[in-house]
Image (tube, grey):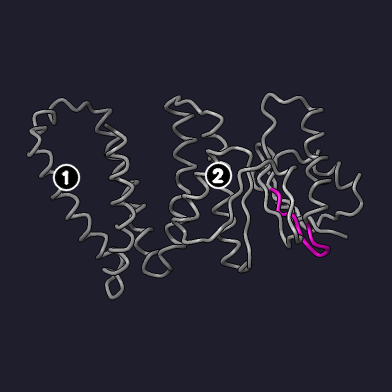
């Protein structure tokens, strides 16, 4: 039964952005948020009394009430930011970035609620993150053709949904990157490299070697690789062993777990 409510939530969330954009074109975003909040408040309490749930109010513990208040404050802050972004930006761009909150939600659920993280869900997180990165990259530097490749079908499905929300046309291919072939070469390859996990050091070393070797056949002469990885040693090793590549720029994203963004070009 919950799946129908989830689908309903997705549908109403989708039309919310369109209706909100129409309603705030000539209205201050803070005023629009306040009006929307009043409507939501009335509707929510109406449902409480219609379903006869008002008797449960007295049973709410102080701990539960605290978390509900904190959740309400977070929701209010989110709405204020969201409506201001909608007023200033395009709906498809705002929604695509807003939906990247899914990454944070899944990770927080894993840490604080001990919810399981399956392989498919884990890959989905990676692809959602990369999808947002790819969308923003395309906004800055529009691309003629965009391809998304992954060996996991569930990840491809999630990436398609994310791209559709953003109004982006991306060719998604369910295939191993190492088996991918194309008639022409690409100007950019954007990749979020897998974490080591239970893989042996030798396996990860071989994986990075295969990736850099394979990318030679797909990257144009003046093309670049935009790589997100926490295996700095493996990246630097391949840059030493494969002289056709050069490190253009390296950005430290998170010092704690050594995540970096590498901009790598062809010599």
Q: Quadrant of the N terminus?
A: top left
Residue 83: x, y in percent? 34, 62
Residue 44: x, y in percent? 16, 45
Q: Which mark is residue 114?
A: none
Residue for badge 2: 156
Q: Quadrant of residue 264?
A: bottom right
Furthest toward the bottom, the residue is 26
Q: Secondary structure at mark 2?
A: helix
Residues 233 and 72: in front is 233
Is residue 27 covered in magenta?
A: no
Q: Quadrant of residue 219?
A: bottom right
Residues 28 and 49: in front is 49
Residue for badge 1: 44
User: In the image, what residue occupies the spot 10% across and 35% down?
Assistant: 51
Q: Find the magenta span and give its range.
A: 219-227
Mark nearest the camera among 1 and 2 is 2
User: In the image, what residue occupies the spot 65% across and 45% down?
Assistant: 192
**Which SS type dominates the magenta stretch?**
strand
For residue 153, side relative to residue 205 (left or right): left
Residues 96 and 174: in front is 174
Above-or-below relation of 171 to 45: below
User: In the image, what residue occupies the spot 63% across and 55% down?
Assistant: 147
| Circles 1, 2 touching at the beta carbon (< 8 Å) | no
């Amino acid at each position: 039964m919950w799946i129908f409510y989830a689908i309903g939530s997705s549908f109403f969330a989708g039309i919310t952005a369109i209706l909100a954009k129409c309603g705030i074109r000539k209205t201050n975003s803070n005023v629009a948020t306040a009006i929307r909040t009043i409507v939501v408040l009335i509707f929510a309490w109406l449902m409480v009394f219609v379903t006869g749930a008002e008797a449960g109010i007295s049973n709410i513990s102080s701990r539960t009430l605290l978390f509900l208040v904190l959740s309400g404050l977070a929701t209010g802050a989110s709405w204020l930011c969201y409506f201001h972004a909608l007023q200033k930006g395009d709906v498809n761009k705002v929604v695509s970035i807003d939906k990247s909150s899914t990454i944070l939600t899944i990770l927080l659920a894993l840490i604080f609620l001990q919810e399981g993280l399956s392989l498919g869900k884990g890959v989905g997180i990676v692809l959602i993150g990369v999808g947002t990165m790819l969308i923003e990259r395309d906004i800055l530097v529009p691309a003629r053709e965009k391809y998304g490749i992954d060996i996991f079908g569930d990840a491809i499905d999630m990436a398609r949904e994310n791209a559709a929300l953003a109004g982006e046309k991306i060719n998604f291919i369910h295939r191993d990157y190492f088996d991918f072939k194309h008639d022409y070469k690409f100007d950019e390859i954007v990749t979020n490299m897998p974490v080591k996990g239970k893989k042996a050091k030798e396996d990860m070393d071989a994986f990075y070697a295969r990736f850099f070797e394979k990318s030679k056949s797909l990257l144009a002469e003046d093309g670049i690789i935009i790589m997100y990885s926490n295996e700095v040693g493996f990246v630097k090793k391949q840059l030493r062993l494969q002289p056709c590549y050069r490190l253009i720029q390296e950005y430290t994203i998170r010092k704690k777990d050594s995540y970096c963004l590498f901009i790598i070009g062809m010599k």
